[in-house]
Each structure stands twice: as C-alpha cells, then as structure tokens.
C-alpha cells in the first residue's frame, strides 16, 4: 500500500498556526515505487549526462479542522522525481466549494516542507507555510 500520511503544522502570514493531516498515494499502478525506491524505478532509463525525471500521478486529501471542518478536501496532482529522490509534489483541490492548492518537497525520509493556499484567487485567500511529519503506523 502506497499511502503516505503526514501530520501538518501550518503557519499563516499573520502568525496564525493551524494543525491538519495530509494523506496521499500514487494512483498509477505502474508508478508504484518498488522496494528499491525511485532509483530502481528509473534504473532502466539511466544515461550518462542525462537527468531523467518521472511524473507520478497522485491523489489524496487534506483535513484542517479550522478550515475544512471535520471533512476532508479531496486532492489530485503529480509528484516529480529523479533517481536521486522526489523533487516536488503539487496537489490541487477537486472540491469547487473548498479550493486548496498544496505544494511540498521532501526534506528527509519522514519530513516535508512547502506551502498551502486556501481559496486561491478569492478575497478571503489564506497562505500558509507547511511543515509535515510522517505518521508511522504500526504493522
């Protein structure tokens, strides 16, 4: 199962701090990351002097109780990765009533950092920096 779950700390421009949860997974069965990780996924495409990147479709959801209520906002987007690891992930909300845009980069194996825009383009737009810690589920 390729579900990634992160506990989020969001900090707004005016100092507002919110907490939330981000969940996402790879949606293309061919894009499932093998045991060797992204380097194994790209091993057959390796060429000297060329950097190969792969675009992986992802879907997920974000929940920020003070913004979304107790429901989740569905997200869809892409992750861009190279043999060295993931570069960035970009997700946009698919619910027209609760628009959200999320972009983040992998800092370490279990930490992400980026930004979140709630209701982009509207007068009530909120911009947050994002820090996430991966939730480790027991097996």
Image (cartoon, helix red, strand yellow):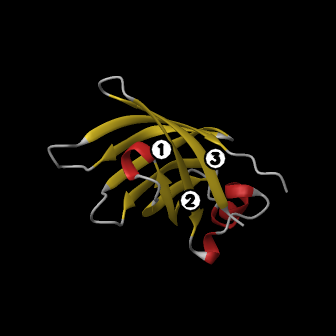
User: Mark 2 = which residue?
Assistant: 24
Mark 2 and mark 3: Cα distance apart in space = 21 Å
In the image, farthest residue toward the bottom = 29
Q: Position of residue 1 (x, y in %)?
A: 72, 67
Mark 3 to mark 1: distance in Å? Answer: 17 Å
Q: Is residue 84 left or right of residue 129?
A: right
- The secondary structure type at the circle numbered 3 is loop
- Mark yes or no: residue 51 visible: no
Asked if residue 129 is positioned above or below residue 125 in the image, the reply reads above
In the rendered image, the quadrant that contains the C terminus is bottom right
Question: Relative to 103, does residue 38 appear above or below in the rendering?
Answer: below
Residue 84: give its label: 3
Q: Is residue 13 left or right of residue 46?
A: left
Q: Is residue 64 left or right of residue 138?
A: left
Q: Nearer the viewer, residue 14 or 116?
A: 14
Cα distance between the residues tagged 1 and 2: 12 Å
The numbered mark, 2 or 3, whose residue comes first in the sequence reads 2
Q: Secondary structure at mark 2?
A: strand
Choose mark 3 or mark 1, whichever is in front: 1
From the top left corner, tell me how far across and down residue 72 is, in percent: 46, 59
Q: Are marks 3 and 1 in contact (CB under 8 Å)?
A: no
Question: Is there any visible trace of residue 24 in the rendered image?
Answer: yes
Crowding at label 3, few (<14), some or many (≥20) Cα neighbours within 10 Å? few
Q: Secondary structure at mark 1?
A: strand
Mark 1, residues whose alpha carbon is within 10 Å: few (<14), some, or many (≥20)? Answer: many
User: Which residue appears at 69% of the width and 67% of the height?
Assistant: 44
């Amino acid at each position: 199962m390729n579900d990634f779950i992160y506990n989020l700390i969001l900090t707004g421009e005016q100092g507002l701090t919110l907490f939330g949860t981000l969940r996402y997974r790879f949606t293309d069965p061919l894009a499932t990351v093998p045991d060797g990780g992204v380097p194994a996924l790209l091993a057959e495409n390796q060429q000297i002097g060329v950097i190969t990147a792969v675009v992986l479709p992802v879907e997920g959801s974000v929940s920020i109780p003070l913004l979304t209520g107790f429901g989740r906002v569905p997200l869809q987007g892409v992750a861009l990765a190279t043999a060295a690891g993931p570069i960035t992930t970009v997700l946009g909300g698919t619910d027209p009533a609760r628009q959200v845009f999320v972009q983040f980069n992998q800092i370490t194996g279990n930490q992400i950092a980026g930004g979140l825009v709630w209701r982009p383009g509207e007068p009530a737009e909120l911009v947050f920096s994002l820090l996430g810690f991966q939730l480790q589920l027991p097996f």
